[in-house]
Amino acid sequence: MSDQSSVTPETKPSNASSLEGRKRKFLVILDGTPESEVALHFASRRAKHTKGGVTLLAILEKSTFQHWLGVDALMKEEARQEAEAFLHKQAARVNEIAGVVPELIIREGKKIEQIQMLLAEDAALSIMILGAGTGRDGPGPLVAMIAGGADGGFAIPVTIVPGSLTEEEIHDLA
């Protein structure tokens, strides 16, 4: 995996120019839930069939622990390292399914704000793929957050994939 695959908001180039000649990218927000795994698989299959790309986004919530700055900084660094390891593991899965190396992005802050900022910065992102939860707790945290209303909505379509889909069903659909 090249250095380009681990992109931070500070180093990510803005590409608001024309999409001509560029691959469209599927955005998957990974939060460690089973439904986000289904979304990853679906997006990977769609990218393979459409010759597109995949962007994996992990969003770290801002820490509320500020009593000792050194401890807070250590907690942030540990969370970032865990997110990086998780994204690299998921990137290997995308590569295995679709044969593409996904773009990896870690952001810190409120999820809705970070998603909207990323969409504003990257014109190649064309579809956000989310997985719906299958349990009694409802559709899952990401779908509930998106459905709960992002002020102004999103500039791209959002595809919600049933979290109960099997790999065979994903292969048939995507």
Image: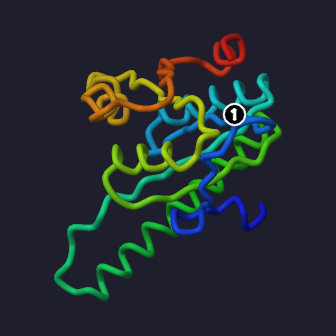
Q: Residue at x 32, y 35 (%)?
A: 141
Identify the residue under disc 1: 24
Q: Is residue 151 above or below residue 170?
A: below
Q: Residue at x 48, y 25 (%)?
A: 158
x, y percent for residue 84: 57, 62
Residue sitting nearer the eye, 92 or 16: 16
Q: Residue at x 61, y 62 (%)?
A: 7
Left or right: residue 4 compared with residue 125: right
x, y percent for residue 32: 46, 45
x, y percent for residue 22: 76, 39
Figure disc tally: 1
Q: Is residue 2 above or below residue 144?
A: below
Residue ranking furthest to the left: 67
Quadrant of the rendering where the N terminus is positioned: bottom right
* SS at mark 1 in the image: loop
Left or right: residue 34 compared with residue 67: right
Residue sitting nearer the eye, 163 or 56: 56
